[in-house]
Amino acid sequence: MRYALTLAFLVIATVGGFLGYQAWTAGPPVVLQAPTQLQVIANGSPVSGTWTRYSSFDLQVRETGQLSGVDVEVRPADQSFSDSPTATVADIGRIACKTCNASNSVPVHVHLADGAYHWQARLHGDSGTSPWMAFPGTIRVDSTPPTITGLNSPTDPNTAKIYHSSTMQFSWQGQDDGSGIAGYSYRLDSDPQGMPHTQIRTSSTSVSLQGLDTGTWYFHVRALDRVGNWGKSTTFPVRIDVSPPGLQSVRFSAYTFNPVFSRLHISFAINRPAKIVRVGVYNQSDGSLIRLYKVPDVPKGQTTTVTWDGKGVLGRYVGEGTYMVYLRTIDQFGNTTVYGWRDFQVVYKRIVVSLSKQNLVAYDGNHVFLTSLVTTGNPKLPTPTGVFEILVKFHPFTFHSPWPKSSPYWYPPSLTQWAMLFQDNGYYIHDAPWRSVFGPGSNQQIGTPGQNYTGTHGCINVPTNIAQELFAWAPIGTIVQVTA
């Protein structure tokens, strides 16, 4: 018959050690057989020597035969046994043992604070006590999560200051007096209450993060010890501004130009001060740098203009072709951004019109593309002289008189097929289906413009076939040079 074994009392480890157990310090001579096996169970699994995060244990004592109780003595590992029980299971009322199992193992329930412990057990009954039997291993308890101390940022140490680098470094110390730290999890986000995921990301106590954008960021880190305790998250805020100077506006004077007669003007304004702005011109076909301009200390909002004269670094005109323009802004902290534009055409085409000769010569560089007789404005409405460029082209185009019907200069709506505006006040090179005479003398008579010998209202009339050829040959931006 098995007798009832009941937990007499439980003693918890303290700084000063364990409270003594006041029983069986003297008595009958030892006649019982010692326990046959000792085992420690925590959370349903055996424990021996390794660290565990559980603080409640079953100290299993296996015995043979019948007995009245079990004594155990649990001490910190650095203290010697005194052979005085710290907990017991005693026979009360001699009823059936409800806590014993089929293998005659008697559990003694104890709760231990963090630390390392050794323990021993003995049996006691009506006929006396058994010898003590020591557990061969050590119980190592670590139920306290690790902590993070000294979290800081060597690159962004002052949490009230705004920094201007997209690279951040963080360092910290981990503290765990038990099983030791297995690793750390960290997270960078914009949430001051953010929490790292429960997975180890590094075993180091520092980390460097790059490529961050402007904003207030929060670095969170927490530690995991070797028995699975996750510590609380510790947070360090940083404020960065890495927004480079951006464009407020940009304007190009032309997309096609002849460097002999005109320039490419690049005007811009930025939304933040820049230590330097670089404007580069590149050959679009091979990407080679043609010209680089550096503009220092550009203030916010001020319109700045860089002019490319169509020459390379050696001072010679570049060849006809397609070019790219890139603009890079750099602030005092090195924050930078780049903008680019393509398809700028350098051409050496020009149309030269002589008023005295009433003729036109179209040049492609030094090569003559075509020549033609023309009719220009009469003495009352002369064609302006100077250097112009083709601003816009229309096909077809109907001219409407800017003069009222009462004016001698009025004309009815007039349809043309090929019209190229070269001066903003309404001066065109165009065909004139109503005209059959071109060349010297066709603009000399005083009279209503539009007849064969009374000239034009100031436009340059050319035969229809010439107008069509010029329209197809001359891009917008082609120089129109009108001489006396």
Image (cartoon, rainbow, N blue to C red):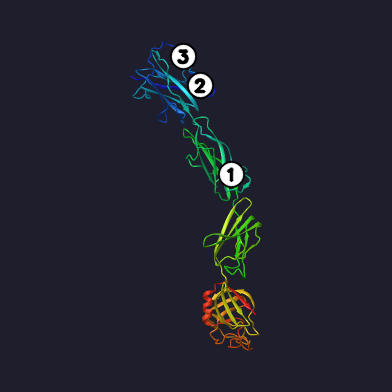
Q: Estimate the spatial distance between the alpha carbons at disc 1 and disc 3, rounded to whole Å.
A: 61 Å
Which badge, 2 or 3, is on the more N-terminal residue?
A: 3
Task: Name the image quarter holding residue 101.
Answer: top left
- Is residue 396 shown to the viewer in this render? no
How many residues crowd mark 3 within 10 Å: few (<14), some (14–19), many (20+)?
Answer: few
| Disc assigned to residue 274 | none
Q: Quadrant of the N terminus?
A: top left
- Residue mark closest to the camera, 2 vs 3: 2
Q: Quadrant of the C terminus?
A: bottom right
Total numbered circles: 3
Which badge, 1 or 3, is on the more N-terminal residue?
A: 3
Residue bearing the label numbered 3: 25
Q: Nearer the viewer, residue 211 or 146?
A: 211
Q: Nearer the viewer, residue 229 or 43?
A: 229
Q: Position of residue 355 (x, y in %)?
A: 62, 81
Q: Amino acid at mark 3?
A: Thr
- Is residue 6 shown to the viewer in this render? yes
Residue 285 relative to residue 61: left or right:
right
Please name the residue shown 48% across and 26% down the image.
112
Residue bearing the label numbered 1: 237
How many residues crowd mark 2 within 10 Å: few (<14), some (14–19), many (20+)?
Answer: few
- Above or below for 334 versus 265: above
Q: Estimate the spatial distance between the alpha carbons at disc 2 and disc 1, rounded to whole Å.
A: 44 Å
- Above or below for 284 versus 387: above
Q: Position of residue 155 (x, y in %)?
A: 60, 43
Q: Estimate the spatial distance between the alpha carbons at disc 2 and disc 3, rounded to whole Å.
A: 23 Å
- Residue mark closest to the camera, 1 vs 3: 1
Residue bearing the label numbered 2: 78
Mark 2 residue element: loop
Q: Nearer the viewer, residue 445 or 191?
A: 445
- Above or below for 481 versus 255: below
Q: Amino acid at mark 2?
A: Asp
